[in-house]
Image (spheres, rainbow, N blue to C red):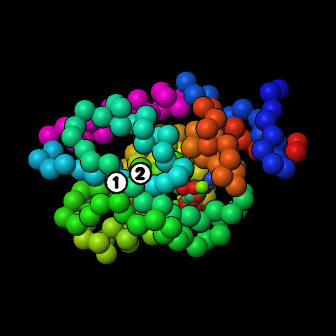
Amino acid sequence: MEKITLFDKTFVPYISNARINEAIDKVAARMNEDFKDSKDIPILLCVLNGSIMFTAELMKRLRFQCQLVSIKLSSYDGTQTTGEVSTTMDFTAPVKGRRVIIIEDIVDTGNTIVELKKLLKDKGADDSYVCTLILKEESYKKDEKLDYVGISIENRFIVGFGLDYNEIGRNLPDIWILDPES
Ligand code: IMP
Ligand code: MG
């Protein structure tokens, strides 16, 4: 099997770029249906850095008027979540009174989503929705509704399509998983 090495870890192919694109098509179609008659201009909130590729691919498919805003959060160190979410770059535009669609690369424990929803509420956002490309279903135990989910996966570490291992691997077009043999 094809393998790649990032620092000390080996990864094997897991989700192809074609399958990722199919999942994005489906999410976009649902979102277009839900937001087509909007009287407002919803915000697409790109959660940097992981969501950058997903946000770009999703946006191309959206047919309603929307505004792109970013924020940078972090909680992962290597292949483990630290459980603490910190803001490393604040919202790039005001969210007060706006409807916000959070665009996440992956939802794992859900700590990031809970923190984001809290931040949005504190800053006076009107309403918020969650859209994630990947969901680690078994790991997610929070009550926040996940409005749009692209692909559900088992609870294992992955890289590619925006997702990193210590900041590398984000540029890979496919998603790769830690080699169980490594
Ligand atoms: P949560 O707060 O535990 O839901 O984790 C969400 C964040 O952790 C994501 O936005 C990612 O940046 C990171 N993350 C979670 N799982 C993975 C993974 O398998 N690979 C790379 N990053 C991950
Ligand atoms: Mg990350």
Mark 1 residue element: strand
Q: Residue furthest right?
A: 181
Does 32 lie within the magenta span? Answer: yes
Dot 2 corresponds to which residue?
A: 46
Please give the label number shown on residue 69: 1
**For the magenta stretch, what is the residue range?**
19-37
Nearer the N terminus, badge 2 or badge 1? Answer: 2
Question: Picture coordinates of residue 164 (x, y %)?
Answer: 65, 49
Q: Reply above or below: 21 against 147.
A: above
Label 1 amino acid?
Answer: Val
Characterize the magenta stretch by its predominant secondary structure. Answer: helix
In this rendering, position of residue 144 left or right of residue 82: left
Question: Picture coordinates of residue 130 (x, y %)?
Answer: 39, 53
Q: Nearer the viewer, residue 94 or 123?
A: 94
Q: Residue furthest left?
A: 39
Q: Residue at x 40, y 31 (%)?
A: 26
Q: CA distance from mark 2 to mark 1?
A: 6 Å
Q: Nearer the viewer, residue 44 or 13?
A: 44
Q: Is residue 30 visible?
A: no
Q: Residue at x 57, y 43 (%)?
A: 162
Displayed quadrant of residue 58: top left
Q: Residue at x 43, y 34 (%)?
A: 57
Q: Are marks 2 and 1 in contact (CB under 8 Å)?
A: yes
Q: Quadrant of ligand 1?
A: bottom right
Q: Nearer the viewer, residue 100 or 68?
A: 68
Mark 2 residue element: strand
